[in-house]
Image (cartoon, grey):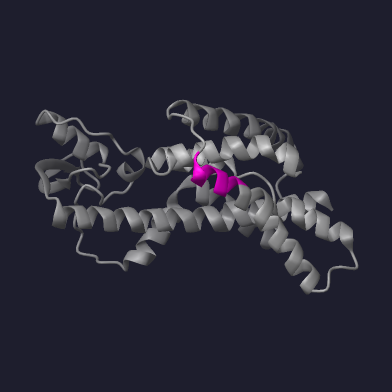
Amino acid sequence: TTNLVIGIVSIVVNAVTIPLGLSLINRGQAALKEKAKKNNGGTEVEVELPQKGTAVKKVKKVTVPDDVPVSDEEAKALSEKGIKREIDLVHAEFKDHAGEDNGKHMNPTLKSVLDAIKKPVAAAPLIAVILVLIGIRVPSSWAPTFDLIAKANAGVAVLAAGLALSTVKFSIDKEVIWNTFFRLFLTPAIIVAVAYLCGMGSDPQKISMLCLATGLPPAFSGIIISSRYNIYVKEGASSVAVSTVFFAVSC
């Protein structure tokens, strides 16, 4: 029964929350870049864009706005002008991020969702859920490989979170305290209250499992994503660290 709860929570987090969060980040950064172009201007550079099916590259003039993450092509063009900018490896995966115009104008919201689904961190859980729903079973001979990945997953996640935390100055402020309180105490309390209102009071065991499932510390995947996008790294890493320690109390 506990494994079922963990499985459901994992599906919600990895197959719903992460793709939704990535789509919001993509939409927000696209809007930020457009706003920066209009208000702050930027640096005009010539970016080399590879042509499909050929080694020939075409050169396109683009304006790289200030204080906005850039792709590797844009960073290279800026460095040739003596301007050093951080390379955004995530956006470098987008074929049209450097300014390529293929004549197709997709809805920004739909585009942000599709860009999010393309990321392995979002695509892998979705594919796994689809395989389960249509009844495709993984051969038993593959089980040891997946068991090894599962056992290493938590350790690698903690290591990645630690590396992200080491790059920022750890601090405890009002936001970190609020995040910890909201995650470990307020959310489970609201869920328990709703459970009683929905008539689950006759089964305290289910309520306790529901409370614990919603009162876990924030997932380490959030820190990995935030460090790649350089968004909310300090606050997120500090919140995860404090919440993980205080979970010993709240549990």
Seen from this angle, which residue lies furthest front? 174
Could you say which is closer to the camera, residue 212 or residue 95?
A: 212
Left or right of 127: which side holds 75?
Answer: left
Quadrant including the C terminus:
top right
Tell me, yes or no, whether the highlighted magenta stretch contains residue 145: no
Seen from this angle, which residue lies furthest right? 202
Residue 175 on image: x %, y %: 50, 46
Magenta stretch?
173-180
Q: Main secondary structure of the magenta part?
A: helix
Q: Is residue 132 above or below residue 95?
A: below
Q: Residue at x 65, y 37 (%)?
A: 244
Seen from this angle, which residue lies furthest bottom? 198
Could you say which is closer to the camera, residue 191 or residue 77?
A: 191
- Whether residue 251 is visible here, answered yes or no, is yes
Question: Which of the 4 image quarters holds residue 192?
Answer: bottom right
Q: Residue at x 51, y 51 (%)?
A: 123
Left or right of 207: which side holds 75?
Answer: left
Count of number-bearing discs: 0
Could you say which is closer to the camera, residue 83 or residue 235?
A: 235
- Whether residue 136 is visible here, answered yes or no, is no
Residue 16 on image: x %, y %: 56, 58
Q: Residue at x 11, y 29 (%)?
A: 80
Q: Residue at x 56, y 44 (%)?
A: 177
Could you say which is closer to the camera, residue 51 or residue 12?
A: 12
Tell me, yes or no, whether the highlighted magenta stretch contains residue 175: yes
Residue 95 on image: x %, y %: 28, 49
Residue 139 on image: x %, y %: 72, 44
Left or right of 189: which side holds 108?
Answer: left
Question: Which of the 4 image quarters holds residue 107?
Answer: bottom left
